[in-house]
Amino acid sequence: MRSRYKYAVSNAPVLRPNRLPLRLHIPEPVARPGEAAHFGNLALAEAGAVARPDIDTVEADVRHLPYTLIRVLDDDGHAVGPWAPGLDAEQLIAGLAAMLRTRIFDDRLFRAHRQGKTSFYMKCTGEEAIAVAQSMALGRNDMCFPTYRMLGWLMARDYPLDALVNQIFSNAADPLAGRQLPILYSARDYGFYSLSGNLGSRFGHAVGWAMASAYRGDEGIALGMVGDGTTAEGDFHEALTFAAVYRAPVILCVTNNQWAISSFTGIAGAETATFAAKALAYGIPGLRVDGNDFLAVWAATQWAAERARANLGSTLIEFVTYRVAGHSTSDDPTQYRPKDEADHWPLGDPVDRLKAHLIAIGVWDEERHAALTKQLDDEVKAAVKAAEAVGTLGASKPPVGEMFECVFKDADWRIDEQRTELGL
Amino acid sequence: MRSRYKYAVSNAPVLRPNRLPLRLHIPEPVARPGEAAHFGNLALAEAGAVARPDIDTVEADVRHLPYTLIRVLDDDGHAVGPWAPGLDAEQLIAGLAAMLRTRIFDDRLFRAHRQGKTSFYMKCTGEEAIAVAQSMALGRNDMCFPTYRMLGWLMARDYPLDALVNQIFSNAADPLAGRQLPILYSARDYGFYSLSGNLGSRFGHAVGWAMASAYRGDEGIALGMVGDGTTAEGDFHEALTFAAVYRAPVILCVTNNQWAISSFTGIAGAETATFAAKALAYGIPGLRVDGNDFLAVWAATQWAAERARANLGSTLIEFVTYRVAGHSTSDDPTQYRPKDEADHWPLGDPVDRLKAHLIAIGVWDEERHAALTKQLDDEVKAAVKAAEAVGTLGASKPPVGEMFECVFKDADWRIDEQRTELGL
Amino acid sequence: MPSMTMIQALNSALADKLADDADVLIFGEDVGYFGGVFRVTAGLQERFGLQRCFDAPIAESGIIATAIGMGAYGLRPVPEIQFADYILPAYDQLVSEAARLRYRSSGEFTAPITVRSPYGGGIFGGQTHSQSPEAIFAHITGLKTVIPSTPYDAKGLLIAAIEDDDPVIFLEPKRLYNGPFDGRPDQQVPGWHGHPAAEVPEGLYRIPLGKAATVREGEAATVLAYGTMVHVALSAIEECGIDAELIDLRSIVPLDIDAIVASVQKTGRCVILHEASRFGGFGGELSALVQERCFYHLEAPVERVCGWDTPYPHAFEWDYFPGPARLIKALRRVTGEA
Amino acid sequence: MPSMTMIQALNSALADKLADDADVLIFGEDVGYFGGVFRVTAGLQERFGLQRCFDAPIAESGIIATAIGMGAYGLRPVPEIQFADYILPAYDQLVSEAARLRYRSSGEFTAPITVRSPYGGGIFGGQTHSQSPEAIFAHITGLKTVIPSTPYDAKGLLIAAIEDDDPVIFLEPKRLYNGPFDGRPDQQVPGWHGHPAAEVPEGLYRIPLGKAATVREGEAATVLAYGTMVHVALSAIEECGIDAELIDLRSIVPLDIDAIVASVQKTGRCVILHEASRFGGFGGELSALVQERCFYHLEAPVERVCGWDTPYPHAFEWDYFPGPARLIKALRRVTGEA
Ligand SMILES: Cc1ncc(C[n+]2csc(CCOP(=O)(O)OP(=O)(O)O)c2C)c(N)n1
Ligand SMILES: Cc1ncc(C[n+]2csc(CCOP(=O)(O)OP(=O)(O)O)c2C)c(N)n1
Ligand SMILES: [Mg+2]
Ligand SMILES: [Mg+2]
C-alpha cells in the first residue's frame, strides 16, 4: 500500500548509471575448524618500540598510537623501552601470584560446574594480566566497572576466596543472597562495581562515577571495561562521548580477546580499524597494548590514570589478548574455530611471560614457582571446601525471604502481600 | 545498605596518592547573548587546497581528510582545485533554483505558522546547498534517509509544492492523511524516506536499505543524514559499525550547523574532534566539507557515491554549515546565542555563493536572478493558496477514519471496535 | 503564598533542592544556559553555577547511564529527558540497570536518580511529542513512577522523588504546564493563577510517593485518573452531574491501593481514565486490581476510557484524546444512567 | 511425519522460508557459522550461503535498525536477539520505528520483520537470561507478538510471522526448546519426542496469527496461558482434577478475544497464568478484557498467577516461577473448592 496521493514522478538527473551490481560483504575469520589457524592479520610491534608521550601531549600528536602495539616484555623476558613501569620485585611477584590464583580458581570452579555444583561459570584464561595489573596499578579510591572476565581484579586485592565460591554456588552464604547469576559479583569495598549479564551497559556508569568524583572535587577515578564484541553497542559510543565532552577522569578499556562467543573481531569492525582507533572519534588518546604483557598493561593503565588525575581527561585503551578457553560453560569453541588456534597466538601466555621476566631479573625460579602454585592450589581447594560445607547449588540457598529484599529500599504492599502469599 | 556479608578491606597498593582535586569540565560556547561572536575555533582551509584521492585509496592514506576542509568555490566565485565537479550551467542553475525555492518556501511557511495555519514548522535557512546538491548528485534509485532540514532534496526533484503545504496544514489533502507532524514528509517515489521526530533512529535504516540493495545485487545506494547534535546517539555508532562491517553502499553524513537547539557543538564533542574524524573509528574515509559550497557538497557526495557503487563501502561526510534561523517555530535563538552570530559565519551564504559563481562564469546576472526569485515566489504563493483552499490546520482535515488506518496492514478487532465506538 | 504555574512549581522544587543538597545536580538536553525547552530549569545554571545544571549530549541512554553512575557514587542526579517519547533509547538503562542495581548488588550500589520528562498529548505535537509511556515503567520491578496533576503536587512530589533512594520516573503532563486543561480544546484554558492548587509554598515540602488524593468525594462511581486526565475527569463529572468520586493516583508505583479499594467498595462502580492507548495500558492493571479486590462490591463492569489503539495521530488529536464526552458516556453506562 | 523438538521445528521453518523466498534472510549475534547459542539457525549458513544467514555485531538497536531498512527495501529479514532480556537496547527501534513506520508514512514504507528471541525462565539463567517482556510489546500499537508453546505451532506460527507484512515479535519459550516442561523441576522432563505436537510436517504450513488453541476443553473454569505456562497449566489441571478449559493464546497481539470470551462465558471463572511479574503485566490486560466482556457471567474474581513483583532471582527460581501448585490454589479458589 502506498500513499493514496500520487504526484508526478521525479525528473531528478540520473547521473552515472551503475554498471557493477552491488554485493554484500560478510566478514569471515582467517580459519574455521579444520583449517589452518594463523594471526597474520594482527598488526604487532617490537617490545620497546613505541615512544611514551608525556601525559599532556596534545591529542593531535598521539594519533599514531592506535595503530601500533605498546609492549614492554621482550622475547627474552626483559622489560624494555620507555613504557617499562619500573616495578619492584615484590610488586611483580604479587602480580604473578594474583594471576596464578585467578587461573587456578578458574580451573577448579569450571570443573565444579561440570560436577553440577553451580549453574554457570566463565573463565578468563590467558587474559589474567589485564585485570590483575589494573587492579594493582589503580588505587583504593578508584572504581572498576568490570566485565565478567576480570576476576583478577578481586584476586589482586585479596577478596576472600570463599565468598567468591559461595556466590558461585548460590548457597546460604552467597554475599549477593542468591539474587544474581554466578560470577556476576559486586564488591564495592574492593573497587569492583556490580556486574550484570547485559553487555556494555555499565560503561557509561564508569563515566558518571568519574564525573561525580570530579564534581565533588574528590580524587578517585574510574575504569570501565568492555570486550571487543561489545564495542558495537551504542552504549560504548555514548559513554565515550560523555567522557570526552566533560573530560571525565575515567579510563575506558577494550579487552580484545579476538572472539565474542563464536564471532570473530571482524564482526565488530576489526577488518577496517583497530579498537584503539575508536579513540580518534572522540579526540582522546587511544593506546593499543599487549594485553598478555603484565608490564605493558600496568604502564598503559598508569599513564591513563595520571592523565585522568591531572584533569586531562579520559583515555581509551585496547588490550590485545586471546580468549584461550570457551566463552563460558555453555560454549564449545571447537565448533567455530580451529582446535589449535591458541597455539598460534603470537603474544604468548601472560603468566609464563611474567614468570620468565622474574627469572630473567633473578628474583624467581622454578622451585619457588612450584611452591607458589601449590600454595595457591591449596588456598583455592580450601575455599571450595568451605563453600561446599555451606552447600552447592540447590543443596543450600539463602532464606527465600531474600527474594523479596532489595527490590526497593522499602518494600511496598505488593512485596508484602506476595511474601505472605508465599507463606513467609 | 551494604551487603550483609563483610570481608576484610583490601590491602591493594595505593599508588600515587592524588594531590590535585579533580574538577568537572562543562563545555561552553565562544559567546552567549551580549558577548562578541566569532568562529575563530573553526578549522578552515583555502578553496582548492585539499587533494582528491582516488576512490579506491586505502583508508590509511586518507586519515588527514577529517581534519581539513574540502572547498571548491573561492572568494571570487571561482570553482578551483581537484574537487571541482565540472557541472554544466544548466545543472548549476537548477541547483540555484532549488535552493531559492527552498528558502522562499521556508520563509512563507514559517509565516503561515505565525498566522496559525499550521502547528509547527522548521526552516533550513543557510543549509540549502546540502540537500539540494545531494539530491541532484544522486540518482533515482538511491534513497535518502533525511533529517527535517532536507526540504531541498524534494525541491530539487520537483516534488509538488501543494502536496508539501497540504501536509504542513494537515488538511484533507495531506498526503500523509493527518497522521504525522508537519514537515515530517515521506516521499518514496522521490527517494525520500519517512521522517520522524526521533533523532538518529533512521541512520541504521539507511545502512539496512543499502545492505538490502547489495544483497539483491541491485544498483541503488543509500544516503543517511543526521545533525551534529545527533552524532551523540548510540544509533549513530551502531549504523556506522554495520556500514563498515558489511561494506554497505551507503553515504553517512553529518550536517554540522553549529547548534542543536540551544546546545553548541562542544556538547556533542566538537571541542576535541571533528565530526568527520568519527570515520576513523570505523576505518572508513571521513570527509570534512564546506556545506555552504554547492560544488563541494556535490563533489564529496559524488566521490562517496562512486565508492559505494564500486563496492568499496561507505564514507562519512561532515558538512560544515550554520543554522541561520531558530531551531523551529518553538525556538528563539537570541535567548542563547549572540543576535549577530550569523553575521560572523565565515563560510557565507550558499545561495549567494552559487549565484556569484554563476555570475563569475558568465551565465547569470541580477536580472535573471530577480526574475527567478519572482517566479519561485509566485509558485510558492500559488501552492499555499491552493492548500488554503483545501483548508488550514483545524479548518480542514482528512476523514477521521484515517486515524484508524495503517496501524497494521489489516486492522484487528480492537481497531474495528474502536472505530465503531467513535461512531464511524 | 505565591501562585505558580506547574513549570514554576517544578523550577522552585529544583531550585530548593539545589540549594538544600550539594549532591543534587541537573543535566539534560538544553537544560543548562537555555533552561530547557519548556523552561523548567530556567535560571538554575545562572543561580547555581555551570556544574549544577548543564547541557548534555543528545544521547538519552548516555544521560541515564551517566546519572546512574553518579547516583551509585552518592550524588542525587535529576536528569531531564526532553520528551517522554525520547526516553525509549534509555529504556534498557532504566530497566536493566537503574531498576536492578540495588537488587543484584544486594544494596551495595543504588541508583537514587529522578528522571524528569514531559509526557502526554494535547499540544498538537504529533506522534513523537505526545505519548504517555507510563505502562512500560509500571511493569518494571524496581522503578517508581510519579505523575503530578497540579503545581502544588508537582513541587511536593518532585522533592520527595529526589529524596527517594530508588530510581523514580517523574512524568510531567506537559499539557498542564501552564494551566489546568480540562480536555475541552474549543474552550479558553484558564491559567493556573487563581487555582487553589497553584498556591505553592516557597521552600521544601514533600508529598509522599504512594498516596493518592481524593479530588472529589462522591457516592455514585469511582474515577481513577492521573496527570491531565484528573482535570478532564473533574470537568466531566461536573458537566454530567453524576456524583462520582475522583481519585488522583499521583504515583502509579507505588500505588495507593487502599484508597482505590476503599472508594470502589463504597461506590461499587469504577471508570479508569488515561491518555495512553488502551490495550496493555496501565488501565488494565488498575482494572484487574479493582476487580480482584472489589469483585463482590462491583455493580457494573469496570470501564476504561483511554486513547485508541493507534499511534498518536497529529490531525486527529481531539478524536483520539479521551475527553470529557467519552468519560461521561462511560460514567452513564456504569451507573446505569445510559 | 518427523518428530521434532521446538528447536528443530524453528530451524525447519527458517530453512523452508529461506528456500521458498529469496527475500528472507537471517542475521543476529552468533547465528551464522555457529548456528546460534540455542542452535536454532544451525546449518542454515552452510546450506543457504553466507549472505542468507550471518553474524551481526553486538548491537541490538543496530540489528533491528538494519532489519527495518531491509524490510522497507522489500526484504523479509528475520533478525535474532540472543536473549529477550537483550531486546531492550532495541526497544526504541521497535516502538518508534518498526511499529510506526507504516502509520506515519501512510503505508509508503513498512517493516515486515520478524524478531525472534528466546525468552522466559526455568533454566537457572538469573536476572538477565530469564525475563518475559511480552507486556512491553503488547502495549505498542503497530507491533504483533507471538508466543508458541509446541514444535508444531512454533513452525506454523513462525512461517506466518515471516509472511506477515507487519513487524512481529516472536518470543520463543526457551524452557520448551527441548521438551514440554510442566513446571516441576524435581521431575525428569520428557523430550518432545512422542508428544503429539512434536509431529511436524516438512515444508511450509501456516498457523494464522490471532487464533488461540483450546488445549483442553472443560466446564469448571478457563485458564488463559501462553508459552511454557501452557504445559504448566495442563499439568496442574490434570493434577487437581478440576475440569478447567485451557486456552493457549499463541499470539497476544492479535489476540483471539472471541475464543477467550466464549470460554469464560461458558465457565464463568477465569485464571490467567504468566511467568512475567504480575504488576503491569499482560495478565492485567487479559483480566480487564475478561471482566469487561464477561462481567455478568463471572462467578468469581478473575485471578492472576504470575511471577512475583521482584527481578528474576537466580537461586529462588522455583520460588518465583508460577508453577502448578500456585495455579491449583487459584483454580480451587475460583471454583470454590478451596
Ligand atoms: C546486551 C547484550 N547482548 C548480548 C548478550 C549475549 N552475550 C553474552 S557474552 C557475548 C559476547 C561478548 O563478547 P565480547 O564483548 O568480545 O566479550 P568476551 O566474552 O570476549 O570477553 C554475547 C553476545 C549480552 N549478554 N548482552
Ligand atoms: C531521540 C531524540 N532526542 C531528543 C529530541 C529533541 N530534539 C529535537 S531536535 C534536537 C536538536 C537536534 O540537533 P542536531 O542533531 O544538531 O540537528 P539540527 O536541529 O541542528 O539540524 C533535539 C534535542 C528528539 N527529537 N529525538
Ligand atoms: Mg571478546
Ligand atoms: Mg545541529
Image (cartoon, coloured by chain):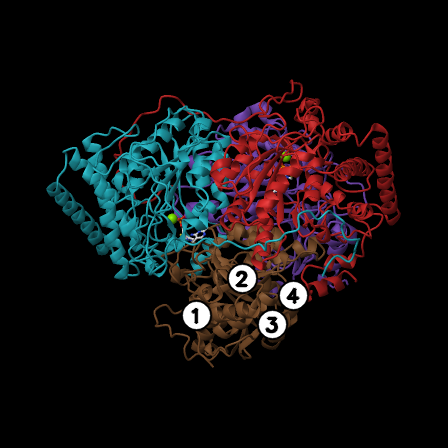
Chain colours: A cyan, B red, C purple, D brown
Indicate the secondary structure of the residue bearing disc 2: strand
Image position of A198 (left or right of A37): right
Nearest to the eye among marks 3 and 2: give it. 2
Q: Residues within 10 Å of mark 1 (few under 14, many from 20)?
A: many
Dot label at residue D25? 2
Disc 1 secondary structure class: helix
Relative depth, front residue between C59 and B38: B38
Q: Quick one: SS at disc 3?
A: loop
Q: Which residue is mark 4?
A: D292
Q: Which mark is residue D208?
A: 3
| Foreground disc of the pair 3, 4 | 3
Mark 1 or mark 2: whose residue is earlier in sequence? 2
How many badges with numbers are in the image? 4
Residue A305 placement: quadrant: top left
| Chain on which label 2 sits | D
In front: B280, or D163? B280
Determine whether D209 is above or below C20 in the image: below
Q: Nearer the viewer, mark 1 or mark 2?
A: 2
Q: CA distance from mark 1 to mark 3?
A: 29 Å
SS state under label 4: helix
Q: Nearer the viewer, mark 1 or mark 3?
A: 3
- Assign the C terminus of chain C to one quadrant of the image: bottom right
Q: Residue at x 63, y 60 (%)?
A: D74
Residue topped by disc 1: D324
